[in-house]
Image: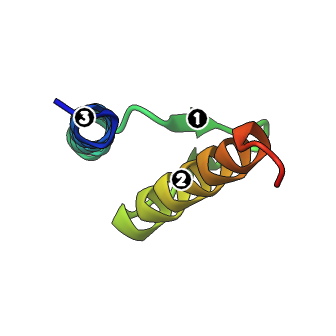
């Protein structure tokens, strides 16, 4: 097994785990109203995070990983 194959497997498994965790968090938020609070005025406040917001978070995480990967590359 080459280095490339190892990194592809690690990336696939970590991506699947992150996707499953975000799907579980989204499902839990939708079914239990987990992120609901009362404001001092008595108004109910809820987090309006949708599926697209979770995708944006995932893309931001991948961007940070790519930047860190660039730091680890040797200079030519």
Instruction: Measure how far apart labels 2 and 3 are at the Cα level.
Output: 23 Å
Which quarter of the picture shows residue 24? top left
Residue drawn at (76%, 42%), measured in percent from left and top?
A: 74
- Where disc 1 sits, the SS reads strand
Residue drawn at (57%, 48%), measured in percent from left and top?
A: 61
Position above or below: 74 against 76: above
Position above or below: 68 against 49: above
Q: Which residue is mark 1?
A: 37
Q: Which residue is mark 3?
A: 2
- Among the two numbered marks 1 and 3 on one chain, the one whose residue lies closer to the N terminus: 3
- Where disc 2 sits, the SS reads helix
Which quarter of the image is occupied by the N terminus?
Answer: top left
Which quarter of the image is occupied by the C terminus?
Answer: bottom right
In the picture, measured across the screen, residue 53 lies left or right of residue 32, that is right
In the picture, measured across the screen, residue 16 lies left or right of residue 43, that is left
- The location of residue 39, given as percent across then percent down, is 72, 39
- Among the two numbered marks 1 and 2 on one chain, the one whose residue lies closer to the N terminus: 1
- Where disc 3 sits, the SS reads loop
Residue lying furthest bottom: 52
Circle 1: is it few (<14), some (14-19), or many (20+) Cα within 10 Å? Answer: few
Residue lying furthest front: 76
Which quarter of the picture shows residue 2? top left
Residue drawn at (72%, 50%), measured in percent from left and top?
A: 70
């Amino acid at each position: 097994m080459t280095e490339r194959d190892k990194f592809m497997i690690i990336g696939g498994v970590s991506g699947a785990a992150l996707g499953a965790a975000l799907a579980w968090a989204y499902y839990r938020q939708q079914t239990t109203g987990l992120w609901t609070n009362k404001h001092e005025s008595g108004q109910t406040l809820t987090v309006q995070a949708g599926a697209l917001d979770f995708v944006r978070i995932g893309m931001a995480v991948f961007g940070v990983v790519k930047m860190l990967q660039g730091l680890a590359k040797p200079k030519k």
